[in-house]
Amino acid sequence: MKIEGFDLTRIAMPLVSPFRTSFSTQTSRDILLVRVVTDIGDGWGECVALGDPRYSPEYVDGVVDVMRRFLIPALAGGGLTAPLVAERLRPFKGHQMAKAALEMAVLDAELRAEGRSFGRELGAVSERVPCGVSVGIMDSVPELLDAVDAYVAEGYLRIKLKIQPGWDLEPVRAVRERFGDDLLLQVDANTAYTLHDARHLAKLDSFELLLIEQPLGEHDIVGHAELARMVTTPICLDESIESAADAAAAIKLGATSVVNIKPGRVGGYLEARRIHDVCAANGVPVWCGGMLETGLGRAANVALAALPGFTVPGDTSGSGRYYRTDITEPFVLDDGHLTVPTGPGLGVAPLPDMLAEVTTSTQWVSL
Ligand code: NPG
């Protein structure tokens, strides 16, 4: 294919309720969408970067800049295919989220033109995927219990609690006591602890958690390996894993025994599939993370989560968990599951009226 250009659209999506993590509180999501226009048709990509560089070094204004200056110009010329996108962008270090959004758009255009779905292309083996939900830090334990209660009533099959120093043992204990030992429960620290907290974190062991996600800093692979020897709760890496090579190294070092795969964090869905393959070859379960995506990113995530190695429910929640109105047809939970789209490409597209309502700016970058 040959690319004519990219439409970069910024949207502002208010959240149904504030989402607090150990690194920030989100009340609205500032999202960059990219639409690629090619000689074989259009495709959509969604960039998961946040408005500020608190989760990772990327942030939306920076993504727009690097795309315009370096990444988009590198995609000029004929004969482009989705797998070639990563190759052409490799000379530019980092910027996985920017690269992932461009590759997603090109892959969508390619698959739409060929009449194939993301699920089929990635290797999905199920028609629907079991869903978990990520529950933010709250002001009080009763407030948290009410929130978890509502999610369990909605049918979510696994609960993930955001934790940080001062909000860990007590909320976990309260949720276990209220909902019992059968509830699939895990926690996510988003790098909020250090190895000095190992003895404290070991106190989580008695709660039979599925895993503790990214307790230590993103570069502290050795620390995670050490921690894994000091606690019985399985360690799961998120921020630390930016490629299949990172996953292979972390597994070899004993730093992770479960992996959260977020396509945006690792440079795209094709690298995400490679991580799935590396983990499967090592007997390491994976699950699909989330970055408060709109229906576009959600569609692709649900397709990815249908691969055989995704053996634990992920953060693929229904659209309504975050947004009162999505920009696509909403993903609605059915008996704790979401259905993998089967239409060409992502199988969904923005509804023009909805998109117009939340758009804050657009710019055309031609090639
Ligand atoms: O369900 O989309 C979702 C959100 C899941 O907790 C979630 N995401 O650290 O994994 C995370 C967290 C996150 C959200 C990180 C937004 C960065 C941005």
Image (cartoon, rainbow, N blue to C red):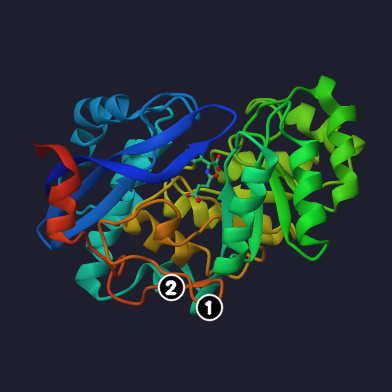
Image coords of residue 315 (percent x, y): 55, 55
Give the answer, above or below, for where 291 lies relative to 345. Answer: above
Question: Residue 221, position in %: x, y?
Answer: 72, 30
* Tag 1: amino acid: Ser
Q: Tag on residue 340?
A: 2
Image check: 42 left or right of 54? left
Which quadrant of the rendered structure holds the N terminus? bottom left
Question: Which residue does the image show at 14% across and 44% down from the upper left?
Answer: 7
Q: Residue 362 carries which label?
A: none
Question: Residue 86 placed where, x, y %?
Answer: 37, 44
**Circle 1 is placed at which residue position?**
126
**Residue at x 77%, y 33% (from the top left corner):** 224
**Going from the N terminus, do you reach mark 1 or mark 2 first?**
1
In what element is the residue under mark 1?
loop
Residue 274 sits in which quadrant?
bottom right
Q: Can residue 104 be seen in this view?
A: yes
Is label 2 within 8 A of ligand 1 (CB to nearest ligand atom)?
no
Q: Out of 220 and 213, give the one closest to the viewer.
A: 213
